[in-house]
Amino acid sequence: MIFETFSANPKLRRYKKIPSLQYYLIVSQYEFLVEIYSRVDDSTSWLYDVYEDQNDIINFPKLDLNLCLSDIYEGIKMREEDKEKDEDYILKD
């Protein structure tokens, strides 16, 4: 299985150099899936979390904000054929 790591993604590497950036979200257009990178304090270290349930709550403590996945996807209908497109990009063993 191949998956992209934080350090291997050029866009993420560039963004993580921005000192004021605290959160970086990747939102799937095909399924309920949000990946979030959160800066640890003022360091160069980042935490990684994945949210996949439409009832999950994403907490952004540095912004004093909580966001439900269902709010991100409000008004969006997930189609099975779109999910299959997303799975086409995953290489399996």
Image (spheres, rainbow, N blue to C red):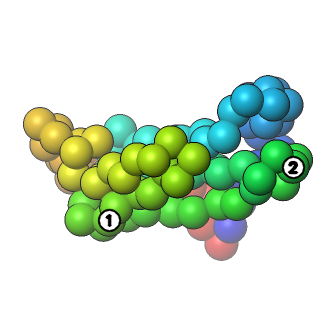
Q: Is residue 7 left or right of residue 47?
A: right
Q: Identify residue type, mark 1.
A: Asp
Q: Nearer the viewer, residue 12 or 67?
A: 67
Image coords of residue 65 (percent x, y): 40, 47
At mark 1, the secondary structure is: loop
Q: Identify residue type, mark 2.
A: Ser
Q: Quadrant of residue 57?
A: bottom left
Vertical side of 40 occupied by 28: above or below = above
Q: Is residue 55 visible?
A: yes
Quadrant containing the N terminus in the rendered view: bottom right
Q: Quadrant of residue 30?
A: top left
Q: Is residue 46 left or right of residue 24?
A: right
Real-space CA distance between mark 1 and mark 2, rounded to the nearest whole angstrom: 27 Å
Point 45% across, 47% down: residue: 64
Point 66% across, 40% down: residue: 22
Mark with earlier residue (1, 2): 2
At mark 2, the secondary structure is: loop
Q: Nearer the viewer, residue 24 or 77?
A: 24
